[in-house]
Structure formats: structure tokens, C-alpha cells
Amino acid sequence: MGLKAISIVKMTGERDEFSEAKLKHSLERSGASDVVILEVIEIVKKSLYDGITTKEIYKKAFDLLRKTSQPSTAARYKLKNAIMELGPTGFPFEKFIGAILSYEGFQTQVGVIVKGHCVNHEVDVIAQKNNQHFMIECKFHSDAGRFCNVKIPLYIQSRFKDVEAQWEKQPGHGTKFHQGWVVTNTRFSSDAIQYGICAGLYLLSWNYPRKNSLKERIDRSGLHPITCLTTLTKNEKQKLLDKDIVLCTDLTLHPKLLKSLEISEKRQKKILRETHELCNNK
């Protein structure tokens, strides 16, 4: 007997129909085994009711993964939520974006003052590779229901054009491809996307553009923020972020950071085990 259509409430307040396929896909991305995936789906389906929120569905699936799989599986599953925990300043998100672009072969600078034709600009990330030169602004949201409307790319494009006018005066930049980017961890409105395409401004969000979204770039790089880790407390994560430690790879390279947080040796080993599993399984 098939499951009748269940109406779910998204973080934006919009309603949609529950999709078993979407839940299965998100569980597959976490690296969970086929047996665990089937078990989680069956239990989640039994708990569904009309009007259930996506947040409730996520929490149920996450809790089940923590009980039935390796910690790193649950850590990968919570990636989207973990990025939202990088706040409140937005700087850790900027550093995370810089790290992803560095992995992709770009030379990057995070949080720099750039001279424009008319005024100076504080730019989140500058990225260069071959003849490509990008000015990147990051719009971080800690609320999944928020999105970037058309005003944001309009504003960023005007800043980029001022910077581009100055860049083009520099020796060797006449043949370079300059472009402005807007990166967000949530989504863009349809008007924002339409403007970006028309103006030549590159937009990158959690699920846009298709096949090269932020989610897919993270999957390819295997880079994860420390907020993914299920073995760290919220307070410990914040202390690491305050020290500008954003990536799980930072912990694998500098394990003594955990000792500075006065974490017991037993827990340190547990945390580093999860960190290594997360970093070694793309």
C-alpha cells in the first residue's frame, strides 16, 4: 500500500509534498549504508503527518543516523545546517568559501581592501587563476528561510564595476576575464537569478547553479566546516571559530588545538577519529 501524499512545510513557510526520493538522496550523500538508509526512511515515514516541517524530518533522520551509523555519516548529513552554524559574523563562511576556491586551484585572499575607480571596497574574497580574476561577496544567513533578493546582486554589481574599472588599468589585466560573484548559503530569488544572468554576475547558492552548486562543490572538495562534527559541543565549536579554525582539516593538521580547549584525551581521540573519517571520505 503506497504512502498517501503528505504536505510538508519548508523553512520558507511554503508547502510541498513529501518526497521519499529527496530524503533517500540526502541520506545517500551522507555515505550511509543501504540498510541504514532503508531503516531511516521507514521510521521517518511512520512519523509523518500533514503539515510536518522539514526541520522535524531532518532532526528525526539526523538522530537516527547518529544512533545507527558512524559519527562522520551524521556529520555529512548535517552539512547544510552546519554551514548555518558558522555565524553570526559571516567571516567563517567567507573563509570556508576561500578554502573551496583554493582547492579548485585559485589563489585566494579573504577579507581585503580593494581600490576601486571611485572608492575603496572591503571585499570578502578575491580569487585568481590563469586569466580569471573574481571579486566575491558572501551573503551568510543563519536562517534557512531567508534568501537573497534582486537588491543584493544589483548592489554587488555596482561595486564590482567600480573595482573592475581599476583592475583594467593594471599591467597585464587587459586580456583578463573579470567577474563579480555573490555567494550565499541559502538561495536567490528568481529575479536575482535573472538579473545575475543578464548582467554577467555569477551567483552561487546551496543548490544553484545546477551541477555546480555550493553543495556539489563541497562534495567534490571533501572540505567540511568544524560545525559538522557531532563529537564537539556547541560551545567548543564556537571557541574554535573564535580562533579562526573553520575547517575539519585544520584539526587534523593541528590536533593540539583540542588540548587548548581542555578536552580530555579520551574525547580528543573520539573527535579526531570523526574528523579523519569525515576528511578521508569525499
Image (spheres, helix red, strand yellow):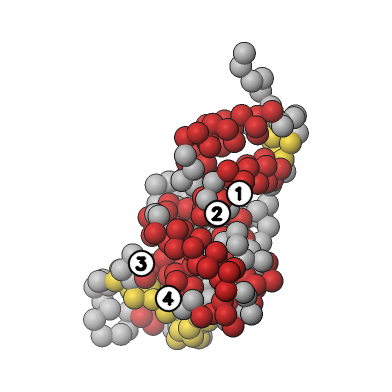
Say whether marks 1 and 2 touch (CB < 8 Å).
Answer: yes
x, y percent for residue 7: 70, 30
x, y percent for residue 262: 64, 80
Q: Measure the C-alpha gap from mark 4 to mark 3.
A: 16 Å
Name the foreground residue: 33 vs 48: 33
Q: Measure the C-alpha gap from mark 4 to mark 2.
A: 20 Å
Q: Measure the C-alpha gap from mark 4 to mark 1.
A: 25 Å
- Secondary structure of the residue carrying tag 3 is helix
Q: Judge depth for marks 2 and 3 and give the one in front.
A: 2
Residue 249 quadrant = bottom left
Q: Report the residue marked by disc 2.
A: 71
Say few, some or many: other residues with alpha carbon within 10 Å of mark 2 (under 14 / 14 to 19 / 20 or more): many
- Indicate whether 2 appears above or below 239: above
Check residue 43 in the rendering and tell me which mark sits there, or answer none: none
Q: Judge depth for marks 1 and 3 and give the one in front.
A: 1
Q: Judge depth for marks 4 and 3 and give the one in front.
A: 4
Residue lying at the far front of the rendered structure: 266
The residue under label 1 is which amino acid type?
Answer: Arg
Check residue 253 in the rendering and tell me which mark sits there, or answer none: 4
Give the mark nearest the N terminus, 1 or 2: 1
Say few, some or many: other residues with alpha carbon within 10 Å of mark 3 (under 14 / 14 to 19 / 20 or more): some
Q: Residue at x 57, y 74 (%)?
A: 265
Say whether marks 4 and 3 touch (CB < 8 Å).
Answer: no
The residue under label 3 is which amino acid type?
Answer: Tyr
Q: Report the residue marked by disc 1.
A: 66
